[in-house]
Image (cartoon, rainbow, N blue to C red):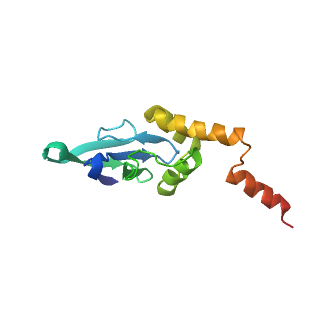
Amino acid sequence: MKTTWNNKQGNRDRQARACLVTEDGMVYRFTGASILGVCCSRVAGFEKKGKWSNTTFTVFHHETTVLVSWHDDWDIGQTWPQLRWETGFLWLAQRAPALSRLAFERFIRSNWPKTASRWDAVAKSEAEFGLRTRTELEAELETCQV
């Protein structure tokens, strides 16, 4: 499959981001370079505009691999503005259904450790205050149904 991706930053210095999710659920950060066994990338064009310079890439990958692209959040400028692990995972899984939860966690921890720390702190706080996750509440409701 052939996909194009452009790394032009958005307004307010919001950086372009991309990742590839393979059919086995693995996720890889894509910055324009080829990834052995996942994709082959070629420069399709370059626009020289100082701060706004950008490159367009043609990405060749398996039909079952999904390239997901986005820009940093408009309001707070974070790559991952979601509040917790679950919502970050769901955001990406909606775009690439084969995504593995374990691979997602490794991906975030290795590429965005500050995001991982923030989400870990939320999970710790929820545990300390006895807050239950939506999944736990749904499971409890299912056992109560007649």
Q: Does residue 94 appear left or right of residue 53 in this picture?
A: right
Q: Is residue 6 visible?
A: no
Q: Quadrant of residue 28?
A: top left
The one nearer the camera, 24 or 110, is 110
The C terminus: image quadrant: bottom right
Residue farthest to the bottom, as pictured: 146
Q: Does residue 126 appear left or right of residue 32 in this picture?
A: right
Q: Position of residue 103 (x, y in %)?
A: 53, 39
- The correct choice, above or below, for 66 with respect to 108 in the image is below
Q: Position of residue 50 (x, y in %)?
A: 14, 43
| Residue displayed at 59% across by 36% down | 121
The one nearer the camera, 94 or 64, is 94
The one nearer the camera, 67 or 89, is 89
Residue farthest to the right, as pictured: 146
Q: Position of residue 51 (x, y in %)?
A: 18, 43
Q: Quadrant of residue 15?
A: top left
| Residue displayed at 21% across by 46% down | 55
Task: Count up the numbered dots.
Answer: 0
The one nearer the camera, 120 or 3, is 120
Q: Position of residue 35 (x, y in %)?
A: 36, 37
| Residue displayed at 68% across by 54% down | 134
Q: Does residue 76 appear left or right of residue 145 in this picture?
A: left
